[in-house]
Amino acid sequence: MAKKIGMQTIILDKQPIILSGAAVVGKKEGDGPLARYFDEVVDDEYVGEKTFEAAESHLLHDAYIKALEKSNKSAADINVILAGDLLNQCTAASYAFRDTDTPFLGLFGACSTMSESIAIGAMFIDGGSADYVVCAASSHFCSAERQFRYPLEFGTQRTPTAQWTVTGAGTVILGKDGQGPKITCVTPGKIIDQGIKDANNMGAAMAPAACDTIMRHLQDTGRSVEEFDMILTGDLGSLGSTMLKDLLYRNNIDLKDKHRDCGLMIFDLSKQGVDCGGSGCGCSASVFSTYILDQFKQGLLKRVLFIATGALLSPTRSQQGESIPGVAHAVCVEA
Amino acid sequence: MAKKIGMQTIILDKQPIILSGAAVVGKKEGDGPLARYFDEVVDDEYVGEKTFEAAESHLLHDAYIKALEKSNKSAADINVILAGDLLNQCTAASYAFRDTDTPFLGLFGACSTMSESIAIGAMFIDGGSADYVVCAASSHFCSAERQFRYPLEFGTQRTPTAQWTVTGAGTVILGKDGQGPKITCVTPGKIIDQGIKDANNMGAAMAPAACDTIMRHLQDTGRSVEEFDMILTGDLGSLGSTMLKDLLYRNNIDLKDKHRDCGLMIFDLSKQGVDCGGSGCGCSASVFSTYILDQFKQGLLKRVLFIATGALLSPTRSQQGESIPGVAHAVCVEA
């Protein structure tokens, strides 16, 4: 039975277990520093499909199959799939999972989707509504550019604040029992909008939401930054990460050397031409599902606060001159 | 503590309560048979805003405020808002709730969003993860036409199988205690795709999913159609409703006179020029949050199976020649 503490945090009595994780990514991600952790690197951006959108669904389905295999569970053991993506309207996930025989609940949290799905899945297991859950998210550089900005053929010049949408899908399997790190508590975040209107500066749109959720989590749990091995944000990138540290510092929270950002980990910013780093639901989903779980397995991590961050960007509202709301959900993972 | 029974159904031990509901709708909906049940009818399709998208957020926020007032709870009592809509990308909900001080989890289930949010909210309350939850969904005829089909200015001729997207937003407040009908069990649905490719025939795309979820619910619970006062689908419309009855009949389930469809209830099909009836997340959300709750209050309903139905239509994938997957989630509401 879950217990609410403070303003927004839920302590999970049963401590649902991350049984396995898997990620399938694109070529550029396979050229990055985390290459050896990914389950598969796909050279063809179409993944053998006819469209980028179909390719993204393909990646997501493959990551799901691989995570399932590693969990030693069968598809019939899974009670529900919780998944989402960036496409209009959660297309990648809907098409990826239409051939499964498992109930599906679609989520939209933009790039916060991975921690949203893990938070909801963990609460379901804790409350007895599910025994085994699939949590998944994906993005694809080509489908996202077409969706949010310009067709690739247009050859738009990138701004220095831009981030590079990760081509990749990540999946974890949560279970009521088994071996693996545990989800001990979750802090669903509020929508925070500080008036950022630049669709090429997602880091700035998301940093205030990340700051709010981290502060809330620390206040609710009474924990300090020192008690974590890592405070892992989704994909703030270099500018957003600097902003987050600054915002927290002004609120008397010093992240010191604890902060890492999936958007800065998945690419080598000095060599790969990704400007401020990686982004997209698939960024934090891929990094968390592979590298982070591996570090837990090796005993190098004992407690991580994972905060995937989402810019709730609507091309339509942006064109209407609206600002971009951000949201961030935190899950605490412990060995 | 929840208990899973059969293949897909979850029995909610705590039986979360629907404390209140409210809906704010457009002029056409206000001219329909359920007019007197709605909390507010807005004559201006812009609701005083500059764009249709902003208008939809406005409706959703207003419905939330009204439901909150009727629940005798304050915004500070709410642990989480679960909401979604049809817009790219869950725009109406993100912007409607960005000024609240409440955690927000975005959902996407197309027109199944209302029962998806109630199902998730009820599982949260049952498991102790939340005490009070907002469940909400919206749609707007003008923003949906622009999003999924053609700009209104284009003056496209409607097909006989078309449905009319409801301009409206519905919200319910669920609580761990208080007065009102109870959520006794939920059946999250699977994605079902029977190959329908016509974006003007949503009823046909959704009927197989509704059939699957209803069959699963009845099998899991061991209940028969006779044990319900109403089997209430979201917005199958006239063609989809006929298909649902036919599909169930072939599986030896006779809906008899128990079936109602929100898409057939919200408009007068003989007079209002809506072809096969109403559709959109806001259709079932508005009807369920007002008329259905009123019938419970009056003692005219004792047990209703509410199955909002969603066509997971992606304009991009449709233009690529793909079929339209459907999904339907069931919640059992009892006096």
Image (tube, coloured by chain):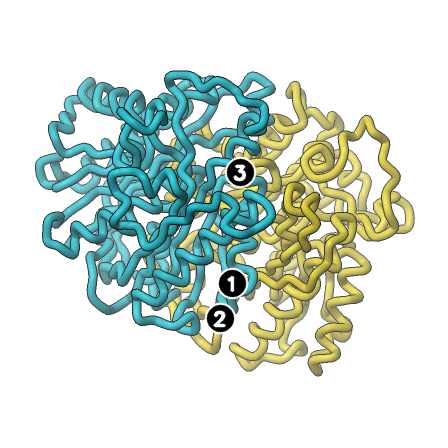
Chain colours: A cyan, B yellow
Depth check, mark 1 against mark 3: the one in front is 3
Disc 2 designates what residue?
B8
Give yes or no for contact between labels 2 and 3 (Cβ–Cβ under 8 Å).
no
Q: Quadrant of the C terminus of chain A?
A: bottom left
Do marks 1 and 2 share a subunit?
A: yes
Comparing B104 with A99, the one in front is: A99
> Marks 1/3: CA distance?
29 Å
Q: Which chain carries label 2?
A: B
In the image, is residue B252 above or below residue B283? Answer: below
* Residue under the image location 45 percent in, 19 percent down: A158
Residue contact at pointers 1 and 2, CB within 8 angstroms:
yes
Element class at badge 1: loop
Q: Quadrant of residue A234?
A: top left
Residue nearer the viewer, B223 or A315 = A315
Amino acid type of the residue that numbered disc 2 sits on in the rendered structure? Gln
- Where residue A81 appears, as percent x and y from the top left, is 44, 59
Residue where numbered disc 1 is placed: B188
Q: Which chain carries label 3?
A: A
**Pick the front one: A9 or B181:** A9
Q: Could you say which disc has been placed on residue A143 in the image? A: 3
The residue furthest right is: B271
Amino acid on which disc 1 is placed: Pro
Which mark's residue is nearer the viewer, 2 or 3?
Answer: 3
Question: Would residue B97 be found to the left or right of residue B198 on screen?
Answer: left
Residue B36 pos. (x, y %)? 74, 43
Q: Which residue lies furthest to the front in this view?
A: A43
Q: Which residue is drawn at 59% across and 68% down?
A: B213
Residue B66 percent across, percent down from the top left: 56, 37
Q: Earlier in the sequence, mark 1 or mark 2?
A: 2
Determine whether the residue tagged by mark 3 lies in a helix, strand or loop.
Answer: helix
Q: Quadrant of the N terminus of chain A?
A: bottom left
Density class for disc 2 (Cα within 10 Å; few <14, some 14-19, many ≥20) is: many
